[in-house]
Image: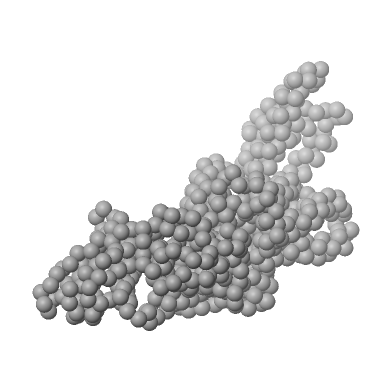
Amino acid sequence: MTRSIAPRVRALVLMLLTVAGALLAGAGPASAHAALTGSDPRQGAVVAKAPAAVSLTFSEEVSMDGDSLRVLGPRGERVDDGAPAAVRGTTYAVKLHAGLPDGTYTVAYQVVSADSHPVAGAFTFSIGAPSETSVSVAAQSPGGGVVGWLYGLGRYVSYAGFIVLAGGAAFVLACWRRGAGVRAVQRLVVSGWVALTASTLVLLLLRGSYTGSGKIGDIFDLELLGQVLQTKTGAALVSRLLLLAGAALFVAVLFGAYDKRRDADRRDLAFGLAVGGTVVAAGLAASWAMAEHASTGLQPGIAMPVDVVHLLAAAAWLGGLAALLVALYRAPAETPVEASAVRRFSRLAFGSVLALVATGVYQTWRQLGSWSAWTETRYGQLLLVKIGLVVVLVGVAAASRRWTARLAEAAPAAAPERDREHAGVRAAAEGSAPAGGAADVAAADSTAVAGDAGEVAGEGPTTADTASAASAEAADSSAAAESAADPVRAAQLARQRAARDAARQKRIRDADPHRFGLRRSVLAEAGIAVVLLAVTTALTQSEPGRTEQEAKAAVSASASAVPPSGTLSLDLPFDTGGEDGEGVVRIELVPARVGGNDVHVYVERPNGRAFDIPEVKLAFTLESQDVGPLPVVPDHITTGHWSASGVQIPMAGDWKVAATVRTSDIDQVTVSKNAKIG
């Protein structure tokens, strides 16, 4: 059974890494956490005279630079004058050139929300009457592309590095102090520090391109880097790097001076390390809280400390789990993980889960705000997946606790018996061997190896097996004595002895069925934790459900507001049944009277964002007079906006306005609504 575990472990690790990668890749661009809730002039409006400025209102505060808000004329020329500025609250405006001619103007914006995520979009308005425009603003996806994917990966690695660094160190100090001298545990904690440091540097370099152009070439732009350092996110990343210098000193002392001290002298140093390590870990956790979701929205003064506690609890649980897994698989036989250490970690993990539940409930209320947000928003859906994974993880942890209890019951009886057996074999060998009698001692060692093998097989060592193993080892030792002058042969024999020692240690570790069961259950926990961390990373890049629903309500209120005199506005929800086939088509008829009219068609997703579809057509029918249908094929103006001029309405009446929407080659639907015209 122990031989077959390696390929199973490799297959499980590969599967979990694939799932985590798919989750990260499927996360896509970072969703905007600030939404455009209004503008003046409003989207698609036709104003009689040129406005002095264009203003935009967002759902929360945003950061802007000189190019964050651009207004482009019909030929694509810039018509804005100066940098945008805050007018009041979350409303920002940019002045326009005086004496602008009639035509269609495009407003493009790209800003950074208060919780560090980029936001971009565009809309049009017209002066006098709509016109053709050479501006084609494609649907912008801020934080997308290769740079966006790299940034998301960097966030995942930074979370994982922090969890391994903080949780691994906590496991050593609080649960298994002997682990400070175990190389495998040392490498795990150091690798967490390296991963967190490297990913923080990468995020700092990517930040300017991530929130701006999205170009690979801008990653090493020093001017952009200087701008990033002046932002809240840049300050948080730099603070994290400074704290990591303190973390490096902590790790050096933990695995250096602390490990070399005797048990009696470790107490004072352990207290100092615990206090210093907690301060550094809390500071590192605060570098996320001060720049992301917790720093904006409701109750930031409460949300940021709660977020710090949440991150520390996750690190203590999942990072300690990683350290326990490494200890169970890689700790040498002479330094096994005691059942008492596993019990202490079990209590630490239980406390961490309680802290996670308490802080998670508050964060859920703060970020969702309503029951409908659980299913109607991406944030709520991801949160449901995360909660499901946590429940499964707690269930597997309960199985680990049972294995721990069995291990604790079996340890008092099994350990002394095995120690006496191995000590007796070695003592007999050492007592019978003359000075320099290496062959006899080696023969005794091989007897111990054979005994271990018998334990794994469920059988005791036989006299024949012991004699055979002793003879083989004696022959090896004789060969070693004969080739003492040959350094190559001596090195070869040293490698053979090392391989035998490693095999013996592995047999001792695997001989206990309770310890073997604990290893498998902890491995399953760690695998679920890998996927859980990927879901959490995707969650931090998603727009909170409360913000998304508030933005939808604001956009809906703006769309349903009383239109200007002489304008007919109709909202027609549609669903073609295909992929990405849901949305709303808004039809505006100006001035909605008998004779010539201008028609504007806007297509939006359910969340209020404009998007393009292959085709949209209109038809006007006056069924009471048997007139129509009168077809109208509007021209595409910009993203989500079509327009047609000179649409003739021959007589007043109750007209049926139908819109045919095609979202793919085969997915099409016609929706309609009656309205009085004229």
Q: Position of residue 27 (x, y in %)?
A: 49, 57
Q: In this rendering, does residue 536 appear at all?
A: no
Q: How many marks?
A: 0
Q: Nearer the viewer, residue 373 or 98?
A: 98
Q: Position of residue 377 (x, y in %)?
A: 45, 69
Judge from the rendering whether residue 529 lies leftward or rightward of residue 421; answer left or right: left
Q: Nearer the viewer, residue 302 or 595?
A: 595
Q: Residue at x 65, y 47 (%)?
A: 221
Q: Residue at x 83, y 64 (%)?
A: 271
**In the rendered view, would you say 628 is above or below 484?**
below
Q: Residue furthest front?
A: 99
Q: In this rendering, does residue 645 appear at all?
A: yes
Q: Nearer the viewer, residue 398 or 607?
A: 607
Q: Residue furthest right?
A: 265
Q: Nearer the viewer, residue 77 or 55?
A: 77
Judge from the rendering whether residue 487 lies leftward or rightward of residue 208; answer left or right: right
Residue 502 placement: quadrant = top right
**In the rendered view, would you say 203 is above or below 47?**
above
Q: Residue at x 55, y 51 (%)?
A: 214
Q: Quadrant of the C terminus?
A: bottom left
